[in-house]
Amino acid sequence: MRTRTIAIAACILVAAACSRPCFNDTLKLTFDQPARIWEETLPLGNGRIGAMPDGGIWKEHIVLNEESLWSGSEWDPANPEALQWLPVIREKLAEGDNLTAQKLMYEHFVCAGGGGENPQYGKYQTLGALEISHHPIDKPVTGYHRELSLRNALANTTFKLGNGTVEREYLASIPDDVIAVRLRSSERNALSVKLSRPENASVRAEGNTVIMEGTLPSGKEEPGQPNSGMHYVCKALVYGNGHIVADADSISVDDASQTIILVASATSFNHSDPEAAVDSTLALASKKPFESIKSRSQSAHRALFDRVEINLPDSAALYAQYGRYLLIGSTTRATLPPNLQGIWADGCETPWNGDYHLNINVEMNHWPAQVGNLPDADLPFTSYIEGMVTSGERTARDFYGIPGWTANVLANVWNFTAPSENPSWGASLTGGAWAALQMWEHYQFTQDKDYLRRVYPTLRGAAEFLQASLFEMDGKLVTGPSNSPENSFIIDGQRCATCAGPTMDTQICKEIFGAVKQASDILGEDGEFAESLMLTASRMPEMKIAEGGYLQEWMEDYEEAEIQHRHVSHLFGLHPGTSINTPELIEAAKKTLERRGDSGTGWSRAWKINFWARVGDGNHAYFMFKQLLAPVCDCGFHYDGEGAGSYPNLFCAHSPFQIDGNFGGSAGIMEMLLQSHRTSEDGLRIVDVLPAIPDCWPEASFSGLKARGNITVGCSWSYGNGEITLQSPIAQTVIVKCGEFEQKVDLTAGKSTKLYF
Ligand code: FUC
């Protein structure tokens, strides 16, 4: 199995140098023909709006997205029975009767209204498409090329038409908040422009603008009633040197050698008058020459993207930078965090509602932010988590009868935080705390005390809920009812997921209690509560190593229903957590990983890169990276049929496309280059440089990555020797490790320090 996949992965790496698609070291995705499937189109985004041109020669289809376009609406999912059944369910768990506990969960401890299946839960949906039809010309098309430059956030398509040339450029501007397309040809030509959407859209053209608007279902409508949910407006403004005429629902352009299309959109999620917002955006942008829109877009993107350089001998650098590119493109102007598809969904029936899953997925979306020197990229997530608190307090009160706030697994833009419809996966009560830990991560990297002060109440509320939720079992404080996402075990010959104190929950509790304690010390407030958390943590179970040498997923060494399950929840403490930090636990973590295997969904493979990087095995981490690259469709490559890996445009395949694997894989590669989660016995931060590089990277370099403590780190190395550069805005002492090399270093504020090994 392993040999076969290596061969396939190698094929994509070889393909990197020559055939189609081509991932080259100039940080470009290039193709020599138009996209045949959506997963060959090229993603552009400014955080709020996204576009995916397919580079069609006569008919160009550009999928459009707007971050907030959700169907559904808010409802109260409180289940009046839940609270009274909670002690009974816990009693059953304490008696070891998990099957009855689970049965009672299904009967009495699910949200009212059907959770993710309720139309009011809603779905993230594509905004639609910009369709450009070019009048076909009977001349041969040659030299076709399309590419996405990650550095410039610019896509283009070029080809020759007879002896003439055609060039098309596409961008999603951060400063001007528009999708901009420029179509140029050496000969004058005719084309038409329209907007479309599979449902809930009315399209008309006026003057030189196509206007598409509509209202999505809220899920509350009576049969026959018009939709009453999210309203959206999208306009495409068309101008250039041709003759422009509005038809009923499209704009025709005649005799043009240059046409520019600006697309703006807004929804009622953020705007009381979306049309006014769109009009003012278009009015401002269209005053600027296209060259200025393009250069402003590039400068804004490069100000973020160029902070990091990674030079590795193969496509790992491209993959890492693609993750940073996608993160910039789905967060910079955003008010919402990237969902399961970032802001690049195609269609109205998005997989898993295109929502926010809190038991790995949305957190993984943010892993490259801090180490990848994009500290602001998790701010939309910060606001999103803060926005969950009020609803999360209701869930804490209605379902658990306690203070603080919580969110379980499913989350949308309508404040859904309750246990979902299926307790076997949907009642994991640490989702909110896991999300909140990204806030602590943000502080640890940036050292921004104002930020810490801002988020402290949210962190505290998540810890307060968990502390109050614990109950005593076998003399230890445990969470429950819960599960270990999303695995089951065999008990009395049957599959069961419901349990008390799964290893991951205990790890998350201890992690967030520790974070609140440290935050309270730094801010000099709330000391008594923080101390109480430490006492609580000391009464929780320790991790257990099973007889087989692996880490136990549950308090009992149950037989797993799926030994190779995609989630590896009990290694939360290895990554992104930090509690698996002794030689014994790390050894057990390795055994766990070996047992779990090297396969899994896209995001699972990505997580395993991070795991193997944390245990210091660069070769295995690299092997997992190649597993993540495995081509998943027959687009010129052999398809190995497993379904997980990468699409031709390097989107991660769960499958289907799920962006978490892109972000997790990108973070994993950076984790192979730099880690900073450890501290020495005397409390000094350890900066681990090249903690897990594979044998095939003997000579390479990186710069601009971030270590905790707001330290910017670079390194270049060649066959065991090299140079490390560190820069910190404040004076601090750290320990730098790199292989055998170890040095205590006093960093001077603002000055660069060089070390040689
Ligand atoms: C979790 C995972 C699935 C999928 C879904 C969106 O439930 O277990 O694999 O990624 O989220």
Image (cartoon, rainbow, N blue to C red):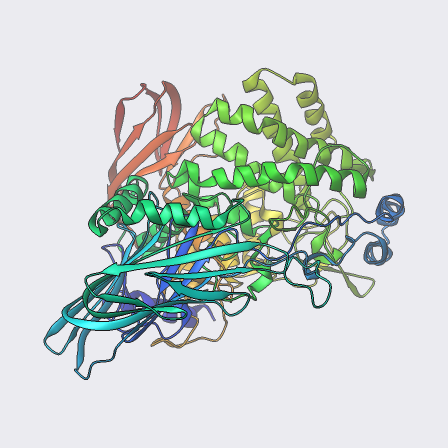
Please say whether residue 532 is visible from this viewpoint: yes
Please say whether residue 550 is visible from this viewpoint: no
Left/right placement of residue 182 relative to residue 476 reads left
**Quadrant assignment, res 713:** top left
What's the residue at 48%, 64% (across, down)? Answer: 657
Q: Position of residue 240 (x, y in %)?
A: 22, 60
What's the residue at 74%, 42% (across, down)? Answer: 395
Q: Is residue 680 above or below residue 508?
A: above
Q: Position of residue 21 (x, y in %)?
A: 30, 68
Left/right placement of residue 300 relative to residue 186 reads right
Q: Is residue 36 above or below residue 424?
A: below
Q: Position of residue 483 (x, y in %)?
A: 72, 51
Left/right placement of residue 294 relative to residue 512 reads left
Viewer-side residue, 578 vs 392: 392
Q: Is residue 64 above or below residue 483?
A: below
Left/right placement of residue 451 relative to residue 728 reads right
The C terminus lies in quadrant: top left
What is the residue that sits farthest to the top in this orientation? 524
What's the residue at 74%, 47% (across, down)? Answer: 555
Disc tally is 0
Q: Position of residue 6 (x, y in %)?
A: 39, 67
What is the residue that sits farthest to the left in this orientation? 163
Q: Give the quarter the ligand 1 occupies.
A: bottom right
